[in-house]
Image (spheres, rainbow, N blue to C red):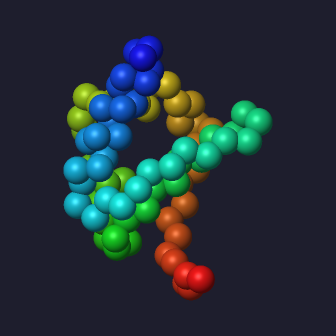
Amino acid sequence: MNNENSWSGSYNEYMSKQKGYISWKQLVEDDMWVDLLTWETMDDAKRILESDHSNALAEKFYSFIDTESCKVHLFSVEKSY
């Protein structure tokens, strides 16, 4: 396992221990990546956005990302089939 996989696995472990965490999927098409995180409540999702950058794992994770190109969207489930 290379270093990137090692720290992203650790970061995933960190995320999975956060209140309300359900799942994290990474989607890709061409050069566009999407992190799809599912939380129990909107408050849980907002909480991680407010607190996530203050730990060493988050800093390492975000050091690989061009944050100028990132957008955050919060969605609520309207219907499930």
For image coordinates 31% across by 54% down, the residue present is 48
In the figure, 77 relative to 9: above or below?
below
Q: Nearer the viewer, residue 21 or 48?
A: 21
Q: Position of residue 14 (x, y in %)?
A: 26, 41
Q: Most extreme residue toward the top, as rendered?
A: 2
Q: Is residue 5 visible?
A: yes
Left or right relative to 75: residue 19: left
Q: Position of residue 5 (x, y in %)?
A: 43, 24
**Which image quarter: residue 46?**
bottom left
Number of marks in the rendered image: 0
In the figure, 6 relative to 72: above or below?
above
Q: Nearer the viewer, residue 12 or 42?
A: 12
For image coordinates 50% across by 76% down, the residue present is 76
For image coordinates 53% across by 36% down, the residue present is 67
Q: Position of residue 68 (x, y in %)?
A: 58, 37
Quarter of the image that includes the C terminus: bottom right
For image coordinates 44% across by 14% down, the residue present is 2
Left or right relative to 49: residue 20: left
Q: Position of residue 66 (x, y in %)?
A: 56, 31
In the figure, 42 relative to 23: above or below?
below
Q: Is residue 45 visible?
A: no
Left or right relative to 40: residue 63: right
